[in-house]
Structures are given as C-alpha cells and as structure tokens.
Image: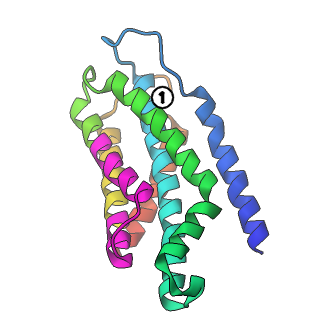
Amino acid sequence: MKKALKFISMLLVLLCAIPMLNCRKSNKSNNSVSVDDIKEYCYYVANSGNSMNEYSDIILKYWYNAIYKNAYGGSIETAIEYAQRENASLKSYINALNNCINTYYEKIRGNSPYKTEINAIMGAYINYYRLVTNISGSYNSFSADSNAYSRTLYNALNDLYAIMPDKNNTNHGLTTYFWLILRSACGLAIRDLN
C-alpha cells in the first residue's frame, strides 16, 4: 500500500512538473506586463500553494504519529526528518516553482495595473513558503499557521481573479485550468474553516 501511494505521489509530482518546462525569462521589456505574464505567475503560485498544502499535510501526519502513536521512537525531529527525506521530490518541486514564481514576480511586480493584488499574493506566498521549507514551532502552531497561510494565499489569488478582465477568455483572462486549480484549493481552504 505504501509503495502504491508513493508511486502515485511521484506520478503526480511528475505530471505537475510538466508546466515547469515553460518557466523562462521573457525577452520582453520590463516596461510592459502582459496578461499572459500575470497568468503564468498566478498559475505557478496556485500550483505551489497546492503542493505546499500537500507537503504540510505530510509533515503534520509524521509529526502526529511521533506524538500520539510513539512512531520514530517518539522523536519529533526524527519524524520530520523522515517526512522530508521520503518526500524530497515534492520539496524539490516546491523549490523549483519558487524559482519560477520569483522570475515572474520580478517581471510583473512594478509594472502592472494589478500591482497591489500581485504584491498581496507574493506576501502571502512568501509566508507560506517559508513555513513549509523551514519547519519549526509546535505541532499546533505549525498546523494553525499552515491553514492560515494557505487561506490567505488563496484569498489573495481570488481577489486578483475577481478583478481580472474576461475571465472565461483564455486569450485575455486567466485560464480555465488555472481557475479549476484555484477553486479546488480554495474549496479545501474553505472546508477547513468549518
């Protein structure tokens, strides 16, 4: 069963990595920001957010097992170390997405009519990224922070979506695929609120 789950997890990571092949610096001038650049930025942020949700859930599962099931000899440090080692490909994917996000953010951050929303997304993203890549605190604080940062990130993405023009036209607005990812992730965050 564990091998099947690990195989499925690896397959999902590989399938998600396909869009990473398109992460590149554009030759366009930094004086113009296209809607496509904003779409790419949001696409990578949403994918990273989903991956960070998955990664933080895995960390919490190992952490919980160390505390309440005496797994890993009851050692929280050992549990987290195992979780990180056994899910290194997911963490690598999150780090690769971070590089793409930073590339697009540098390009669009100061020259977009959506500057406020883009900066809000980046602020929320940075908080969540730092949490899942530098695990610290207690089980309860990590869990609460993970949920809060995830909600903040998806709310910021949703705020941008609400004001983007032509949402259903993939030539001018954000792609349907991206919004399916966002809606799915927002649904998870909203479900967590109840």
Q: Depth check: 99 or 179 in front?
A: 99
Residue 159, position as x, y percentages in the image = 29, 44
Nearest the viewer among 103 and 164 is 103
Q: Is residue 3 magenta?
A: no
> Residue extending furthest bottom?
69
Residue 158 can be seen, yes or no: no
* Residue in the picture at 78% in, 67% down: 4
Q: Which range is magenta?
A: 121-146
Q: For residue 145, what is the image quadrant?
A: bottom left
Image quadrant where one finds the N terminus: bottom right
In the image, is residue 165 above or below residue 192?
above
* Left or right for 73, reference 28: right
Amino acid marked by disc 1: Asn
Q: Secondary structure at mark 1?
A: loop
Q: Which residue bears the numbered disc 1?
A: 169
Quadrant of the image occupied by residue 187: bottom left
Question: Which quarter of the figure is the C terminus placed in?
Answer: bottom left
User: What secondary structure prevails in the magenta region?
Assistant: helix
Quick check: 57 left or right of 165? right
Q: Is residue 173 left or right of residue 96?
A: left
